[in-house]
Each structure stands twice: as C-alpha cells, then as structure tokens.
Image (cartoon, rainbow, N blue to C red):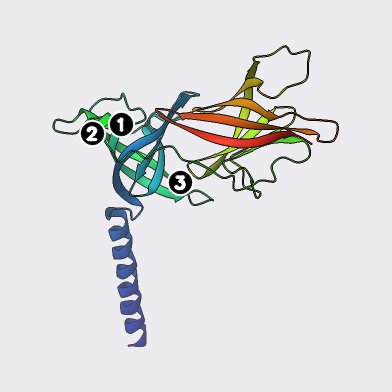
Amino acid sequence: MKNLLAIMLLLTVSSSVGGVGKQSRSGQSPNRGQFEGVVVEHWDGNKSDGNIVESNGKRYEFCLACPGSVNDSPKIVGGDDIREGTRVRVTYANLTRSRDGRVYYVKALTVVNLSKQPGTPKASDNTSASPLVIGDLKNSDVVMGCSCSLSTRRRSNGKYVLLSDYEKKNAWINIDGLDVKLTFVGSTQIRRSNRPERRGDRHTDKWAARGIEVQVDYLVAAPATERKEYTDYETTMTVTKGARSQTIKAFGACGC
C-alpha cells in the first residue's frame, strides 16, 4: 500500500512539473512590449543602423540593421527612411537597462514608420520631439591642470558647460543630461598669429563626437598678463545634434 501511494505521488508531481513547463513555453515572454515615440538620435556605421527613441520620458535604443544574424534585424513597416524626428511604433523583446539607468536597450521585432502612415502628422509638425538641452557637466574633474572652461554664469561656482584640456585634444560637454567626450576638429582665428591675444580678438574652435558638432566663437574680454596667467573670454556656443540645434552664451577662461 505504501509503495502504491508513493508511485501515485510521484506521478502527480511529474504531471505538475510537465504542465508548468508547457505553459512557460507557450506563454508570451514577460520581457516583451511596445512603445511609440520620436527618434531623437540616429547613426549609421559598421553596417549598423542605430536609433534612440524618446517615449513618455524614457529612452529606448535599438538597431534596424544589426551586425551578425539576419534575425537580429526587425521587420520594418511603412518605409525604412527612419531618421531623427521620425515618429515610430516599436514592438520589442529583451529589454535591458543601461548602467546609468538613462537608456533601455531592446531587440526590435517590428518597427512601424508612423510618419508614412495615412492621417499621421509629419514628424516636423510633432511637438513631442524634445529640444536640445545643454547643461552643466556632472563630472568637472575630467580635466586637471591648465585648461579651458566655460560656464553660463560669469562666476562659475564650479559649474561648467564645457571643459577642455589646454592642448585642445579633447573636451567634455553635457547634452541632454549626459556628459559627452568631444574630439578637437580645428580652429580659426581673426588676428595675426605671431602676437599675443588682445582685447577684442576673436577665434573659433570646433569639436565633434558621433552625431554631434560643437562650435565655440570666442571674444577676448581680458587678455593674460604677467600677473594673470589666463585669458578671459565671452563666447557663443552652438551645439548641433542631428536635426536639433541650440545656441547659448557662455563665459570662461583659458590658462593655468
């Protein structure tokens, strides 16, 4: 009798486990979903086609043509000319969050280009596309020693919108809440290069990162002297990221 009860119990447990397994395989993955929003960043490179979409205050990153398996590329409905400003609806799987919590990485299954759908407003008329935001750097310790610094305040109080090393190899700027490293592109100056800077002299520096261009127009407010080893500037800084652009006034200095 005891052996019979043990066999019946074993059969019951095996049946329950098998039932759960079948339900799990046939059920939809909890890591699936859908969002609708506007492409705020788009890039091409290394055979990939990447996008970041802003939806309800969150940002989702996915690719349209991923390196590797063909299965990594989603189905596109309504035209594949997806660029910044395009409104899309994305069905996704495999949602993961970036370490800083600012972006969600997803595997796009289907991407619908809503800008091509009848009755859908053009992306250029869509007011939900967020404006470009230039903010204070979160980490102001990226440059040590002699440097160039810019702030929207005449007295920075340690808050900077742009920092660069004195040799102009790299600079850092905060765009849309993220600190971004820039690479120096070039400089032009409206003065004879064989004399020190004077009050009223002007020059322009250009920086770039992936999908980002930064131009800073400098006006010398107070040149360096024997007692003051830095030059004060008044500047106009223009930042372009895709189809969005922002221009601000900033004050700062270069020196030691």
- Place of residue 234 in the rendered image (x, y in percent of width and height, measured from the top left): 61, 32
Sequence-earlier tag: 2 or 3: 3
> On the picture, is 183 further left or further right than 134?
right
Label 2 sits on residue: 114
Quarter of the image with the C terminus in it? top right
How many residues crowd mark 3 within 10 Å: few (<14), some (14–19), many (20+)?
A: some
- Place of residue 190 in the rendered image (x, y in percent of width and height, measured from the top left): 64, 14
Q: Amino acid at mark 3?
A: Val
Q: Circle 1 sits in a helix, a strand or a loop, which is it?
A: loop
- Place of residue 233 in the rendered image (x, y in percent of width and height, measured from the top left): 65, 31
Q: Are marks 2 and 1 in contact (CB under 8 Å)?
A: yes
Q: Residue 93 or 128: which is nearer the viewer?
A: 128
Can you name the residue that lies furthest to the bottom here?
1
Sequence-earlier tag: 2 or 1: 1
Label 1 sits on residue: 86
Q: CA distance from mark 2 to mark 3?
A: 22 Å
Is the residue 190 above or below the residue 65 in the image? above
Can you name the residue that lies furthest to the right here?
226
